[in-house]
Image (cartoon, helix red, strand yellow):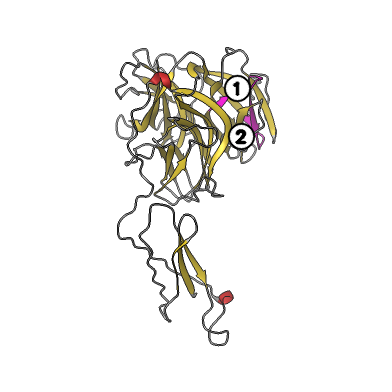
Amino acid sequence: LYATVTVRDPAGAVVGGPALPTAPPLWDAPLSAGPLTAGRYTIVVEPIGYQSASTGFSNYGSMGEYRLSIGVNSAPAVAPLEPPAPPPPKPTQNCYAPVTPDRLLDTRSGLGGSIRIPAGRTVTLQVTGRGGVPTGATAAVLGVVAVDPAGSGFLTMFPCTPSRPTASTLNFVARQTVANTAITTLSSTGRTCIYAHAETDVVVDVTGWIGAGASGRFIATGPTRVADTRTGLGGVSRLRAGGTIEVDFSSLPSTTRAVALNVTSDAASGPGFATVYPCASTRPDTSTINFVARDVRPNNTIVGLGSNRRVCVYSMTATEIVVDLVGYFGQSGLSYLPATPQRLLDTRTSVGMLAPAGVVSYRPSVAALGSATAVSAAVNVTATDHVRAGFVTTYDCVTRPTTSSVNAIVGQVNANGAIVPLASNGRDSCLFTQSGGHLVVDLSGWWVR
């Protein structure tokens, strides 16, 4: 292989090279470029011909292996750091507004300005000013998908703080496509940073935002099961490939703007995805749940209610669908106080392995909330090290419902976002695990009054 090396900046302009190789046998092509500003740079290695066809070979015949060695004069940040965020608005100013689901990032195509994320790297995604999210939003409801990761790992979404928090948003295994939805706190410039523990493609969809300009306040209702194609609850039956079911929420107050749901795919006939969206709008090019054959895969979501007050669930593949109502957004209720992600519970380092049918409590109210009283918390719940399939239920430490928040699959680390109720003391929340194992809980923010 006889090749040149070129360095291009984020806009594609050449900032170094092309560097020609030295004479054989080493054929080194040393190149220096800089100084460089923070951003994603591309190093292009391109085969060229050597001498003439009679004494060497053409670029068509220039093929083989090469080794690329990169050195820097200082360790660059893997993502631009944000200035310190101002104090969040008073909780009474942070309400929710739905948007038509829209795709903000797809590293497979470069949408959003990033390509496939290498292991241990962080990319920055601009959220405000796109997808109906206005400037000034303090948080956004984002569905994140890991696509074809190179190994087992996790993603962490955080508000681009100088230090990446000890928390995870999504867990995956090699070659798995899996989704989760999180209420993601944004930086002062309206961005979120996405860290990838293992190399992977990432897709991010937005379904709503939280800030001073919104009006939807949260009312907790459950969780309560409202549709189940396995039993016919809600008047629905198993989805055929390419089919859609409608879930009626007309019984909720007329001022309801959106609903918080946990939607589960069960016994799918093959790999595919499901999309949850307002029935009154055209089905968007987004996904809510990604699954494989015979998988039990949940994801939480917050979706707006259209004029007909129905939510649609489309499935690419034949599957059963279960819908649990967690709460809804109306004119009165709770407002939101965002937080930088922080770990609240990790049984691996505290109480130890939980037995089947085990229960563990934790306290989400770990920060000074001022005069606000936390009623619920937005968290991410992760199940790991379970030796059999099962489920995890979140509840207020008093009455445990028959619904599930996370479905545990043997050999995987399974995570799902949840809006969890707090006990009457305003502090404790509980987890029940059917299959045992370890549980991890990371905080995103509080629903307060």
Q: Position of residue 154 (x, y in %)?
A: 43, 42
**Element class at badge 1:** loop
Pointer 2 local density, CA inside 10 Å: few below 14, some 14–19, many at least 20: many
- Please give the residue where the numbered disc 2 appears in the rendered image: 274
Q: Quadrant of residue 15?
A: bottom left
Q: Position of residue 194 (x, y in %)?
A: 43, 42
The quadrant of the image that shows the C terminus is top left
Q: Residue at x 37, y 21 (%)?
A: 90
**Element class at badge 2:** strand
Is residue 275 something one can see in this rendering? Answer: yes
Q: Residue at x 61, y 29 (%)?
A: 277
Q: Nearer the viewer, residue 127 or 305?
A: 127
Q: Residue at x 42, y 68 (%)?
A: 67
Q: Nearer the viewer, residue 36 or 398?
A: 36
| Magenta-drawn segment | 302-320
Residue 323 horizontal side relative to residue 66, left or right:
right
Q: Residue at x 44, y 24 (%)?
A: 212
Question: Relative to residue 171, is residue 301 depicted above or below?
Answer: above
Q: Residue furthest bottom?
A: 54
- Amino acid type at circle 1 is Leu
Residue 29 horizontal side relative to residue 312, left or right:
left
Is residue 421 something one can see in this rendering? Answer: no
Residue 283 horizontal side relative to residue 3, left or right:
right
Q: Nearer the viewer, residue 408 or 250?
A: 250
- Please give the residue where the numbered disc 1 appears in the rendered image: 305
How many discs appear? 2
Q: Position of residue 317 (x, y in %)?
A: 66, 37
